[in-house]
Amino acid sequence: MARVFNFGAGPATLPEPVLKQAAAELVDWHGSGMSVMEMSHRGKEFIKIHAEAEADLRELLGIPKNYKVLFLQGGGAGQFSIVPMNLLRGRDSADYVATGYWSQKAIAEARRYCKVNVAASAADAKFTCVPKQDRWQLDPKAAYVHITSNETIEGVEYHWIPETGAVPLVTDASSHILSRPLDVSRFGLIYAGAQKNIGPAGLTIVIVRDDLIGQAMPLTPSVFDYKVQADADSMHNTPPSFALYVSGLVLKWLKQLGGLKKMEEINMAKAGLLYDYLDQTEFYRSAVAKEDRSRMNVSFHLRSDQLDAKFLKQAEARGLSQLKGHRAVGGMRASIYNAMPVEGVRALVEFMRDFEKTHG
């Protein structure tokens, strides 16, 4: 069977060259006589895989030397708890900005550990935009300011970096990391689950400034203590080794492609194709403010919800998979991450035109 165009929000599509390389190396990695899945994480073979992945990530993002790169487990949702456990550092409150489903999840979890000041919220706009910063009510005594820089479900993305003064800025970048260049030095901490734009599910990447680690809450499990993991080179416990290996292949694919500037150009072209079509039809609609539209997750609705099931069935028949929107918002969602080729977006737009002609 031919591969479909997989528009799933995560676990998501991976670059085909990466999948083929992983398949070729599955039984015997580089003449070692072992699969990566069988290796000791402390053996020289895996140490090489780990070191190359970190070096490539640092190169792609231009990560400064005073930041640690951690390869952990627990997903982005795990970091909802791990961040306050590590970054409160004796303070009793943190600022959060609510822009959708995942930022609200982060807020709820943080409230188990500290007082949360919701510095701004887009709830009044039904989470269809990013609140302008002049509306934010930041607390200069907060331990950190947390944002979700791309809301996977609503399709809302920050296209700017907030100014938070001396208070460290933290972002959940799970669904758009590596989709464009990023000034890491503007953040105290960046975290991301791998299963959208980096690699398979199971790996979580944390990029954290040196001065923010080493003061974890006493209740923090050692495997969740950034300092413990940094001192152990992310190997205090067994890391998600195969997920890290495949993610390393994705990083090399990105470098071969031309890096994040080139990736951004491609992503802007892909998103432009889909949004341009949505803007010229009344059969489909996108509620997200144009300036805050996500390049990664395009959420839209048909004119009538009664057509949703038919749309999805016919899309599947055309090899366009996993377009159903999240249950929290309904409708459709096309996740067009780095590994989605432009041909996939063209095929989707062509199908949407045909469906509109038949049912419009």
Image: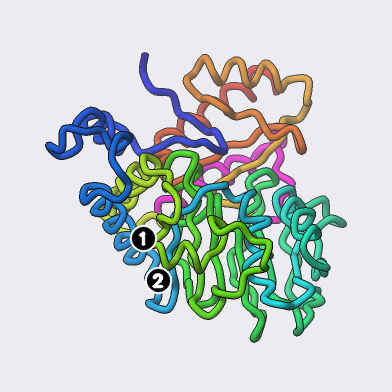
Quadrant containing the C terminus is: top right
Circle 2 packing at 10 Å, graded few (<14), some (14-19), many (20+), is many
Quarter of the image for residue 330 reads top right
User: Relative to residue 78, is residue 40 drawn left or right?
Assistant: left
* Residue at disc 1, secondary structure: helix
What amino acid is found at the position of numbered circle 2 in the picture? Ile
Q: What residue is drawn where x is 49% and y is 18%?
A: 318
Characterize the magenta stretch by its predominant secondary structure: helix
Q: In this view, does 84 lie to the left or right of 343?
A: right
**Residue closer to the observer: 219 or 310:** 219
Q: Position of residue 94 (x, y in %)?
A: 75, 71
Which of the marked residues, 2 or 1, is nearer the chain's N terminus?
1
- Give me the residue at 69% from left, 19% from top: 359
Residue under the point 26% across and 31% down: 20
> 177 or 86, which is in the foreground?
86
Residue 106 vs 285, above or below: the answer is: below
Q: In this view, does 229 lie above or below 93?
A: above
Q: Mark 2 points at which residue?
A: 63
- Whether residue 77 is visible here, answered yes or no, is yes
Task: Please indicate, yes or no, whether residue 291 appears anywhere in the rendered image.
Answer: no
Percent position of residue 175, x then y: 55, 50
Q: Quadrant of the N terminus?
A: top left
Residue 19, horizontal then vertical, whole percent? 32, 33
Q: What residue type is labelled 1?
A: Leu
Q: Find residue 57 and name its label.
A: 1
Name the residue located 50 percent from the left edge and 75 percent from the top edge: 209
